[in-house]
Image (tube, helix red, strand yellow):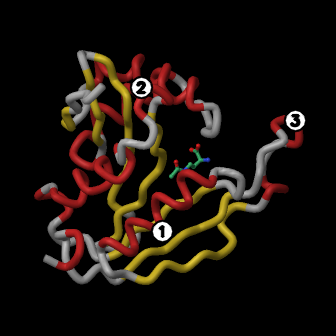
């Protein structure tokens, strides 16, 4: 089936559906519903949802790096299992890059846990599309997380410089 997917900025009412999507994804840290409302409200210009038949099937949250102008930090990206393999993750990232708010963006940073391979390949693909280098280094070590959570380390990925905001250097 060919599903029509629409990409748009989130609004705070989407928060609860985004929270459900992140919970279902399984590979991400589940923040509070309140946190997702805040992201969908205050960070809406640098975040996006993918919608199909009124259902939220994809989400990306990001914010401008507070200490590095021209750097976008991508916090979380989640795609529903129902639409996997359709390139929704890449399209969510491209949607952010196409925004007016991203005109000055030349670098992207994110942290990803080692086992989250789908997300790692998503960012490798992003670097390729935007003809940018990608570097991996230590982000947040495992010991910094509560032992009770058994949280993996978070690897830091730095992508850039981006030469064009149009994929493939157009
Ligand atoms: C890009 C991405 O989704 N990173 C996840 C970071 C962290 N493990 C989280 O917030 O889930």
Q: How far from the left and from the top, in percent, is residue 143? A: 84, 56
Q: Which residue is mark 3?
A: 148
Judge whether 37 appears above or below 43 on screen.
above
Badge nearest the viewer, 2 or 1: 1
- Closer to the chain start, of discs 1 and 3, is 1
Residue at x-position 57% and y-position 25%? 23
- Closer to the chain start, of discs 3 and 2, is 2
Q: Is residue 137 left or right of residue 9?
A: right
Instruction: Decide which of 3, 92 is in the foreground and name it.
Output: 3
Badge number at residue 18: 2
Circle 1 SS class: helix
Badge nearest the viewer, 3 or 2: 2
Quarter-wise, where is residue 169 in the image?
bottom left
Q: How far from the left and from the top, in percent, is residue 10? A: 25, 31
Q: CA distance from mark 2 to mark 1?
A: 24 Å
Q: Is residue 121 left or right of residue 40?
A: right
Instruction: Decide which of 36, 124 is in the foreground and name it.
Output: 124
């Amino acid at each position: 089936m060919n599903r029509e997917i629409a990409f748009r900025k989130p609004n705070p009412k989407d928060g609860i559906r985004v929270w459900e999507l992140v919970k279902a994804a399984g590979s991400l840290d589940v923040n509070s519903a309140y946190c997702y409302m805040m992201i969908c409200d205050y960070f809406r210009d640098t975040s996006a949802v993918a919608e199909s038949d009124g259902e939220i099937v994809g989400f990306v949250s990001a914010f401008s790096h507070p200490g590095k102008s021209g750097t976008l930090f991508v916090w979380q990206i989640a795609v529903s299992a129902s639409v996997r393999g359709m390139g929704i993750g890449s399209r969510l990232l491209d949607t952010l890059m196409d925004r007016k708010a991203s005109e000055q963006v030349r670098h992207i940073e994110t942290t990803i846990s080692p086992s989250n391979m789908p997300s790692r390949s998503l960012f490798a693909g992003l670097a390729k599309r935007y003809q940018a280098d990608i570097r991996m280094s230590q982000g947040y070590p495992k010991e910094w997380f509560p032992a009770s959570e058994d949280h993996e380390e978070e690897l830091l990925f730095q992508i850039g410089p981006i030469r064009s905001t149009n994929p493939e250097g157009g």
